[in-house]
Amino acid sequence: MRWIDNHCHMSVEESDTLVAEAKAAGVQRCIVIGTDLEKSEEAIAVAHRHDGVWATAGIHPHEAQHGTQGIFELLSDPKVKAVGECGLDYFYDHSPRDTQMEVFAEHIRWAHDLNLALVVHTRDAWDDTFEVLDREGVPEKTVFHCFTGGVAEARLALDRGVLLSFSGIITFPKADDVRQAGAYCPLESLLVETDAPFLTPVPFRGKPNTPAKVVLVGQALAEARNQPAETIAQFTWDNASSLYSLD
């Protein structure tokens, strides 16, 4: 089985170990995510260091108050395959909500202009997330990373042509809504991720997450859907390869 961790974070210094461990576990491709200018530059450096690794560049909603200067220029790098992560986070509200919405809209316009995928972060902000996407137009290739909604939110996203990426949360005992959404989502719209070093799946809670553990996410998603893990691996591989134009 071949797996793609379509959303993870790592530094250049730790990347040699993490990428080697991932490939040994069957995770042959990784997308390293930018969350501000510095982290986007580092994600690109990691991608250039390793075969089978690509990057994104963007401003996380937590960082929206600091602006987007320098990000657009990074999007022309051939190793950059998506804009983001970007979006809205009303759980922490580290940036003012109106600023988050403005920065999110700017990222959407970049995705349209450059024909790049869009990586969306949304937490406790479903209504405004859909409002901004509808106003700006949903890019043809869009993913809701670390999907935390239930079937209702999944339906609203899927109706807009969005892909849903499931993380280690799907292994958490209390995440029934997420498992139901994972079972509801069509195979053609599924992705898997770790969001490493965060959201470590069961049974490794309390330890740093790594891209190698996306295999556990895929297995949990397969169990929720009552399908073979091989099926999940193949579809998420194909979906991620298409989303990020890897082939």
Image (cartoon, rainbow, N blue to C red):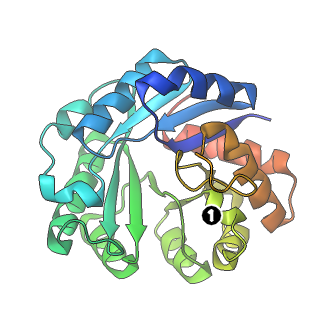
| Percent of width and height locating residue 149 | 54, 75
- Left or right, 96 with reference to 137: left
Residue furthest front as drawn = 206
Check disc 1 and give the amino acid type.
Ile
Nearest the camera: 220 or 74? 220
Q: In this view, does 13 lie to the left or right of 64?
A: right
Q: Name the residue under label 1.
A: 169
The quadrant in which the C terminus is found is top right
Q: Quadrant of residue 47?
A: top left
Q: Can you give x and y, in whole percent of width and height, for residue 79 in the image?
A: 39, 25
- Please give left or right for residue 20 compared with residue 91 in the image: right
- In this view, 39 is above or below 78: below
How far across and down, in percent of the image, does residue 145 sit? 49, 57
Residue displayed at 31% across by 37% down: 39
Q: Look at the numbered disc 1 and give the secondary structure of its residue.
A: helix
How many dots with numbers? 1
Q: Residue at x 52, y 45 (%)?
A: 197
Q: Going 30% across and 54% down the picture, which residue do you hit?
A: 60
> Badge 1: few (under 14), some or many (20 or more) residues near its Cα, within 10 Å?
many
